[in-house]
Every structure is written in structure tokens, then in C-alpha cells.
Image (cartoon, rainbow, N blue to C red):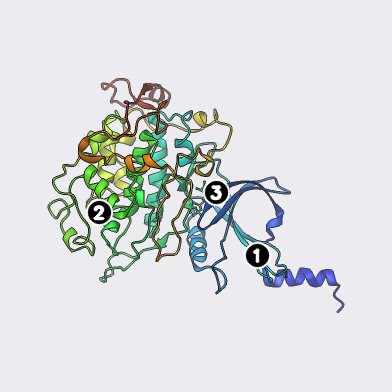
Amino acid sequence: MMVSNRDRMIQYDDLHFPYCDDVSKYEKLDKIGQGTFGEVFKARHKRSKKVVALKKVLMENEKEGFPITALREIKILQQLKHDNIVKLNEICRTKPVNNAYNRWRSTFYLVFDFCEHDLAGLLSNFSVKFSLGEIKKVMQQLLEGLFYIHSSKILHRDMKAANVLITKSGTLKLADFGLARAFSQRNGQPNRYTNRVVTLWYRPPELLLGERNYGPPIDIWGSGCIMAEMWTRTPIMQGNTEQHQLTLISQLCGTICPEVWPGVESLPLYAAMELPRNHKRKVKERLKPYIRDAHACDLIDKMLTLDPSKRIDADTALNHDFFWLDPLPCDLGTMLSHHTHSMFEFLAPPRRNRHHHHHHHMHHNQQPSQAGGAQSSAGGVGGAGGSVNSVTQSSSGLSHHHQPHSSSSASQGRRHRAAAASVASMSTCPERIF
Ligand SMILES: Nc1ncnc2c1ncn2[C@@H]1O[C@H](COP(=O)(O)OP(=O)(O)OP(=O)(O)O)[C@@H](O)[C@H]1O
Ligand SMILES: [Mg+2]
């Protein structure tokens, strides 16, 4: 049978990449993200005009072909199907060419449904104001996503505001499964997972103390940090080192000791780390100036429980009064329709942590950068001894911060959504951040 050159080319392509289309069917629009793991672009399907996000698979350090970390991310994403988890549509590739640089190697892209915003971008834009009902909707969706992945025996291991996406219609999607892994529970043997996971500011105390037999509570801790950030608009505990992070945690959550956390004394780094003594737990007290809603403070308090075995789980959190008392969770679509441009951490003003020095290779440490400069180390609810630190509203960009609160403490009954939404009103926040 005669085969033309053109046919031969097509056959070559099909044989080598079945089910893996050429990325040139998309046109790149804007760059929207940059991680250690690779770049993320907004792109549009040339024919259907569907808008997607393309996440490049970084191959630079690979000698052994397709990176195992990306394979793990793809495998996990393919397994997860939920409205509050980002949707992976397909994997695409560039056409292999034989020049000095590429030598027949393709670049691969993960193709996701496009989400207009990430939570870090939204929180760093002070014209974006969340009502209490809207904050409830964000946290409810986040916890529903977590409940689903934990029920599917997956740990996210990189919870932070930049990894929480929100579509323009207000649907929240957990993203960035680059550090995620499957976990097993109670098979007799303790697990020995790496503890070099989770961006430092969102890292729970058990990981900082070297625990390797951890589980879903690590993601709940990060979610508690994110929940507080919905009001503070900046990460609450911005440590510079693992030791500093533990100090900030102790100052906010109280001294880490066997009395509140039985067994903590046998964690690998318990003796090696300096754990500040005589600190009372001050989570609610420190958050109160920012968060008037007592149920919100109570839920954050339970998510930031030091002992992971006592920390609230996603299911119990979803049943917390916070979500079931007036004002009820309300749709984010209307609020977001007032913002026509996308907001991403990558595109946000430079005072936020824009550069990420964490690594997706498990043996490396993972930390957010300190692009915020001086205020990064001073910032956070864990400030020493209850004293206010040097970060003023204006220097931290919080001068126009508003926080929602219930106008009447008597209004605890259930109401219609519309009525509930109107209960949330605005007031200015106190002079200084923690
Ligand atoms: N589906 C998407 N829609 C819109 N934006 C996205 C999407 N996926 C990722 N992004 C944007 O790109 C950023 C980086 O993506 P992602 O977190 O998956 O990659 P990463 O390389 O692991 O990043 P990092 O190292 O910063 O955590 C996200 O914070 C988000 O702003
Ligand atoms: Mg990320």
C-alpha cells in the first residue's frame, strides 16, 4: 500500500502520542501563574473558543523522561471528580522537533477549565469585599472540596489561598495537586510520609515537629489559616524559618506541650525545636478585632487546634453553627460580577508573596518567599505577648479593609437568603494588623 509523506507524518504523530493532542489547538493569551513547577497560561481553543488554563510540565531537570511528580498529580486529578475540585480536561504536547535544544522532546501541558480568580488575588484587592454570607460560601465550598478529597483518601498537602480558585460565577475549586498524595489509614504500621510539605505559613505544628505519620488534619490547619485570612486579608502567621513559624504558632495557639497534646513529646523534633513556654491560647482574642462573628472565631479556633487528633475534621466543620445560622452562606456570583478583570496572586501588587521558592521535589523544603519584606516577618496574629507589632494599616496595605459582621446579635434565627444577605454590613477594621 502506498503511503504519502503527509500520511506518514500523521501516522508517526498518532503512533507516538495517541490521545495526546498538539497544544497548538490552543492560542496562549496571558501568563497567569509561575511556580517552581512551571508556568500557567490562560489560553483559548482556536475552534470552540473555550477558555482554559495551561500548566506547563517542567522537564528541565529530568533525565529519566516524564517527571514522576507530574504523573502523580495527573493520576490524582483524573481520579477526583467534584464541583469543588479543579477539572483536568486533557494533557497536550508540543510537536517534537529536532533542534539542538529540543532534540525530539515535547513540552507537555495540563489543560484545566479556566477559573477567573484565585483567592490570594481576590484577597489582595481591596475593592473586593466579601460579606459574611459570602465568606461562609467560600469556606463551605472549600470544606466540601476537602471532605471529598479526604473521603477519597487523598491529602492535598499545599493548602494556601493561591491554590484556591474561584470562577466568575462563584464556584470554588481546590487546585494545585502537585504535592498531593494518597494516604492509608490504620493498617497497623505507622506511615512514613515526608514532612517537607505545605508552604511554611500554612504548615501545621505536627509537620514542623517532624511527624511523618500524618493525615487529613494537615489540610484542615491550612484551611483555618485561609479562613482567618478572609478577614485579615493577609496570611496570619508569616514565619521566616520553621523555628519562627513554631514560635508564631505558640504565641497564637498557646504553648505546645503534652498537657494539651498528649504524645507530642515523642515527635522527632520536639526536643530539637525551641518551644516557647507559658503562652496562653489566644486564637479568639486575637481574631476578635477582625472577626465580629463569634461562630467564625469558634470554627477557626477548632481548625487551629494544636493536637491533630483533636482538630475538627471537614465533615464536623461543615455542620458547625457558622454555616447554619443567619446570615446563611450566599452566592458569590453577584459580588464577583462587579469585577470584570481576573485576579491572581501572580498578577497582584508586589507586597504579596509573589515568588515561590518551594519545590515539588519531596526532599526539598518548601517555603513561600518573603517578597513582602519587613512586614512579612512582623506580620501575623502570633505577634509576641499580645503587643501590637510595627505593621500599620497603611504599610500593610490594609487601610481600606472592611469586615462584615452581623448588625444585630439578636438575629440568630434562620431567615431567607435574601434577608440574610442584607444583615451583613460593613465596618472599618481596627488601626493595626495583629
Ligand atoms: N485552572 C486554572 N484557572 C485559572 N488559573 C489557574 C488555574 N490553575 C492554576 N491557575 C493559576 O496559576 C497558579 C499556579 O498554578 P498551580 O498552583 O497549579 O501551579 P504551581 O506551579 O504548583 O504553583 P505554585 O508553585 O505557585 O504553587 C495558581 O495559583 C493560579 O493563580
Ligand atoms: Mg500553587
Q: Residue 430 appears at what percent x and percent y?
A: 31, 26
Q: Position of residue 252 (x, y in %)?
A: 24, 42
Task: Residue under label 1, please give it.
Answer: 19
Bin the neighbour count of mark 1 within 10 Å (Cα to Cα): few under 14, some 14-19, many 20 and up.
Answer: few
Q: Mark 3 or mark 1: which is in front?
A: 3
Q: Amino acid at mark 2?
A: Pro
Which amino acid, by three-letter code, is at mark 1?
Tyr
Mark 1 or mark 2: whose residue is earlier in sequence: 1
Q: Residue at x 39, y 38 (%)?
A: 234
Mark 3: which amino acid?
Answer: Gly
Residue at numbered disc 3? 33
Given residues 220 and 146, the one toward you in this image is: 220
Give the x, y percent position of residue 138. 42, 38
Point out the frontmost of discs 1 and 2.
2
Q: Is residue 359 above or below residue 418?
A: below
> Which quadrant holds the C terminus?
top left
Q: Quadrant of the N terminus?
A: bottom right
Label 3 lies in ligand 1 vicinity (Cβ under 8 Å):
yes
* Quadrant hosting residue 417: top left
Instruction: Report the front residue among 66 and 187.
Output: 66
Q: Residue at x 55, y 70 (%)?
A: 62
Q: Residues within 10 Å of mark 3 (few under 14, many from 20)?
A: many
- The one of 382 and 373 positioned closer to us in this rendering: 373
